[in-house]
Amino acid sequence: MRKIYFILLFIVFSLLLTITGCAKRGTISGGLKDTIAPKITGSSPENYNTNFTGKEIKIVFNELIKVKDITKQLIISPPMKTAPIIVPQGSASKFISINIKDTLQENTTYSFNFGQSITDNNEGNPYSQFKYVFSTGSYIDSLTVVGKIKDTYNQKPDNFVSVMLYDAKTFKDSTVYKEAPLYVTNTLDSLKVFALENLKEGSYYLVAMKDKNGNNKFDPKSDKIGFLEEPIKTPSEIAYQLELFKEIEAFKAEKPIQQSTNKYFMAYSGNTKNLKVTAKNGLKNVAVKLTKFPVVGKDSLQLFVPKIESDSIEFFVENDNYSKSFVSKYKELKETDTLTLTSKQNGTIRFTEDYALKSSTPLTSFDKLKMKLINKDSVALDFTTKYLEFEQELVFEFKKEENEKYALELLPDAITDFYGKSNDTLIQRFSTRTYADYGNLSVNLKNINRFPLILELLDGKGKVLASKTSTKETTLTFDLIDPMLYTIRIIYDDNANNEWDTGNFLAKKQAEQIIYFPKEIDVRANWDINQDFDLEN
């Protein structure tokens, strides 16, 4: 028994040594993570005080805090012409000091909404939407206007949208361009709804802006805008909806810049739908071809001209009411534009598209007798061609069969460009897949408000892949489309021009209405999808 006792004692002692050794090698836990936001222990003057006449406000917290992104997060309503000085910014402190530099209006309630800018120093826990409010009068204004922000074109609205109220008695069309609003709030980085608080009773114009300059004034070149045509009155129990749109700028062209011996680039803003460009060398007319700039997202055009004997060329640009001339330098450069033809497709052609060749220079003549299209059995196929000058694309239209291989042959001189240059022998090969490699989507529209309308099919990045128009049909079908997730939307095409039209603030014109289907539609290979789309929901 005594022997067993010593053995047990040895085992217990060994276990204690093991536990002690493990403890020595381990690390001490820091305990639970701090998730509690800082708290305010006091302010001077007190929050929601009246008859305010001071210039400095101090807000004290129970722990060290930081103030970050103050220029984006802080909303002062009514706006101040001279921004207050707020400390600290970036460094840790137990207080916030607001030094007012502006002259305050009489009998006015001011609010400082700090959004998500106040956090504790250690864990970054935010003190969300803290507001400091005071009045220069004898009471705090307490009325509220609430609503929702929507983007007219995109499915998701922008963040950091400013929502503003202007005094209806003094409001003019020019006010949003020149003057700050009476009241302002912001949706910040996470909210799609808004609340304008601490308002006086009155009549106001309600306007929303994606204010990129942050100056509370509308700049059509950079800002989106949304507005109600009629003034609203407070108090109000209505939840308003503001739909933002980007205006099309009035057309403006920049001076053309020579890029090669034969080509100029011309930057522009606005709509090029009715654009016309002509050119002269002294009193002599110069032929000019206007085409699209090949890089997506660049607001520039290409102007192709022949070789001239001069050191300058004058361009005349006209677009509706716009008319301007530019004198640009001309010189022969080493780089010249030569005729090259490339396939728009990458080896495979869809049943819903036509085969196209993109040219590096504008084309002027085509000899179909020097063109041949054959299938994999070397059978010649009938086809027609059309040339899209603005896009510099030669399009071949023909009946396509599934799982077929094609060869397009252009013999020398089949195509001639603007400079009299012709092609060498060119053979392009491409093929089709089977019908089973694609899916079909039928959309059944319900509770249509009006015609005509446009149904658009978009990919995950918002790019329009296909569209259908309707003046009476309620079922529209997209056949043989790629298997993928699609977004669909309806445009009420009120002016029947087969495209979406944005709004205009000065014309008091809202953008054409767009309704998105709320979910993505999964189109799979060899599947037929029938999807109901209720336009009332």
Image (cartoon, grey):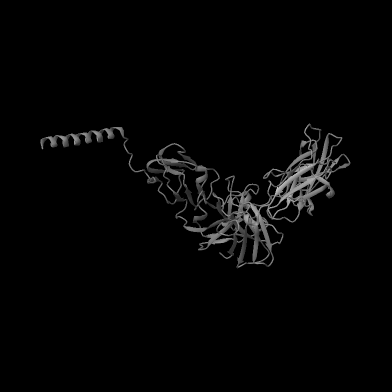
| Residue 490 picture location, percent across and down | 63, 60
Which one is nearer the viewer's eye here, 511 or 172? 511
Observer able to see residue 503: no
Q: Is residue 450 above or below residue 25?
A: below
Report whether 494 appears left or right of 21.
right
Q: From the viewer's perspective, is 434 left or right of 521?
A: right
- The quadrant the N terminus occupies is top left
> Is residue 10 positioned above or below 325 on the image?
above
Name the one closer to the observer, 355 or 321: 355
Residue at 59% x, 44% y is 213
- Which quadrant holds the C terminus? bottom right
Residue at the extreme left = 2
Quadrant of the image occupied by residue 278 = top right
Of 356 and 129, nearer the camera is 356
Q: Position of residue 421 (x, y in %)?
A: 83, 40
Direction top: furthest residue: 334
Q: Residue at x 81, y 48 (%)?
A: 371
* Residue 512 placement (x, y as % from top left): 65, 59
Residue sticking out furthest to the front: 377
47 left or right of 301 in image:
left
**Viewer can see residue 30:** yes
Does residue 113 appear to the left or right of 463 in the view shown?
left
Instruction: State how many labels appear.
Output: 0
Residue 355's spot in the image, x, y percent? 73, 50
Examine the rendered structure and indicate whether residue 63 appears above or below residue 275: above
